[in-house]
Image (cartoon, rainbow, N blue to C red):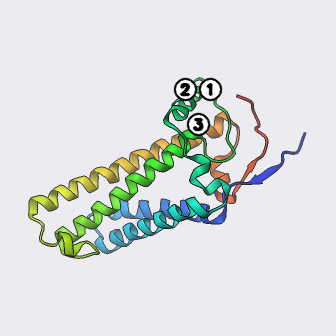
Amino acid sequence: MKHRENIKVWDPLVRIFHWSLVFCFLLAFITEGDVIDVHSWAGYSILILLLIRLIWGFIGPRYARFSDFVRSPSLIMRYLKDTLMLRARRYIGHNPLGGAMVLLLFGSLILTTVTGMAVYGATDNAGPLAAWFGQTSESGAELFEEVHEFFANFTLFLVVIHVGGVIFESLVHRENLIRAMLDGYKSKQPTQTP
């Protein structure tokens, strides 16, 4: 059996960011409406994590950089078509759909956290946006809350699609992408040519 050579793809910051984000999002989601302090701090942590990852996307190593995985809509659609036909090319870093998912998750999480801070300011006159939203009417606070819940649920929907995509890609390319996000390594050579 031929030994496959591995390459370090996900640096420690990307991996710590990923799993910390998973933890904080799940914590915020399950404490919604019950434990406002824990819910709020989980939300603040998500925002800080996103800020760190945004900076890292410009200054980090190759596979962490947005320039490595942000692709044009036409390439994303072509990759989606190839994926559905089970002939998609294997990428060492994020594939075009994975890159698009990163951007969707970032956007949805930012909107979730910002609207959450608006809700906190409007309903409890607390948090960093209290000065702007502390005098919001009850109907305005309810609107913020509905928008916040929409984006939290939309983020959960994206997470489900993301996990499904990771499992699908792992099966198609015969590699354990979850393990790669734990130890940082992927095989240099594909185990199967699509």
Of helix, strand and loop, which one carries label 1?
A: loop
The residue type indicated by label 1 comes to Leu
Q: Earlier in the sequence, mark 1 or mark 2?
A: 2
Counting the numbered discs, the total is: 3
In the image, residue 141 sits, relative to residue 88, either above or below, namely below
Q: Amino acid at mark 2?
A: Lys
Q: CA distance from mark 3 to mark 1?
A: 10 Å
Image quadrant assignment for residue 59: bottom right
Q: Which residue is mark 3?
A: 168
Disc 3, SS: helix
Which residue corresponds to mark 1?
Answer: 86
**Residue on which disc 2 sits:** 81
Q: Earlier in the sequence, mark 3 or mark 1?
A: 1
Q: Residue at x 10, y 58 (%)?
A: 139
Q: Are marks 2 and 3 in contact (CB under 8 Å)?
A: no
- Where disc 2 sits, the SS reads helix
How would you rate the neighbour count of disc 2 (Cα within 10 Å): few for under 14, some for 14-19, many for 20 or more? few
